[in-house]
Image (cartoon, rainbow, N blue to C red):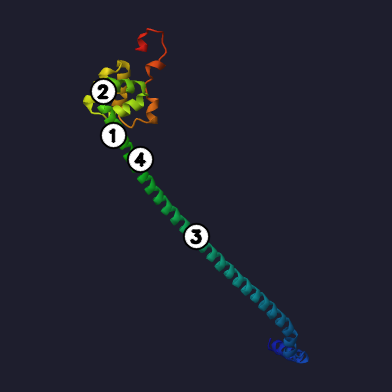
Amino acid sequence: MRKILSLSVFVLFLFGAEVPVDCVSIFEARKSELVKEIERIDEEKQGLEAFRASSEAIFRERSAQLSKKESDINATLAKIDEQKARIENLVKRNDEILSQIKTMTTDKVGEAYGKMKDQAAADVLSAMDRISAASIMYALAPKKISSIMAKMEPAVASEITLLIKQGPPFGKEDKDRQIDSPAKIEGPAGNLLNL
């Protein structure tokens, strides 16, 4: 076995000496391929860096636009809230003024009817729509109300009494609950419904 091993080592040296290995020529042959590969990798790296830089620039630009829009929206919301508060204050002031005007008007009308004779006041209030009559009578003193109602027709007095009982406000929403006046009730002449 020693002989075979020595023979194979000898053959290897013999053939190995015949084939000279020129590492420099192999490296030179591969060098151009490696340079091309390195250039390709560099180009891809530069392209990737350019893409990353443009992506970051676009991201920063869009973030700035988004921040600007967000600040614009917040400013608009602040203006809207300010206007809403101002409008609410105006509505509140207008309601107070309207309430004062209604009170003054009701007081003056009530004062005028309070000074009228009972029969004259009863005649005028009977001719009015029931809601207006109830509003006026509500502002009068209870003693004056009873003396005016005593001079009215019983049907009219009862209608106005029902409205006064419901209490103010005597407005448009009360018209659905309004009792029709005797002129609107249909029935034959002399019928009890016409009283």
- Secondary structure found at label 4: helix
Of badges 4 and 3, the one in the foreground is 4
- Secondary structure found at label 2: loop
Quarter of the view holding residue 94: top left
Of badges 2 and 1, the one in the foreground is 2
Label 3 Cα crowd, 10 Å radius (few <14 / some 14-19 / many 20+): few
Q: Earlier in the sequence, mark 4 or mark 3?
A: 3
What residue do we see at 32% from left, 18% from top? 156
Q: Is residue 148 left or right of residue 180?
A: left
Q: 173 or 96: which is nearer to us?
A: 96
What residue do we see at 65% from left, 74% from top? 47
Q: Label 4 belongs to which residue?
A: 98
Q: Label 1 belongs to which residue?
A: 107
Q: Earlier in the sequence, mark 2 or mark 1?
A: 1
- Secondary structure found at label 3: helix
- Viewer can see residue 21: no
Query: Answer yes or no: do the residues labelled 4 and 2 have beta carbons within 8 Å?
Result: no
Q: 158 or 98: which is nearer to us?
A: 98
Q: Label 3 belongs to which residue?
A: 72
Query: Marks 4 and 2, Cα distance to the nearest angstrom?
Result: 30 Å
On the image, the x and y values in percent for residue 121 come to 29, 23
Query: Marks 2 and 3, Cα distance to the nearest angstrom?
Result: 68 Å
Q: Amino acid under label 2? A: Lys
Q: Amino acid under label 1? A: Asp
- Residue 115 drawn above or below residue 15: above
On the image, the x and y values in percent for residue 48 come to 63, 73
Q: Label 2 belongs to which residue?
A: 117
Query: Marks 1 and 4, Cα distance to the nearest angstrom?
Result: 14 Å
Quarter of the view holding residue 111: top left
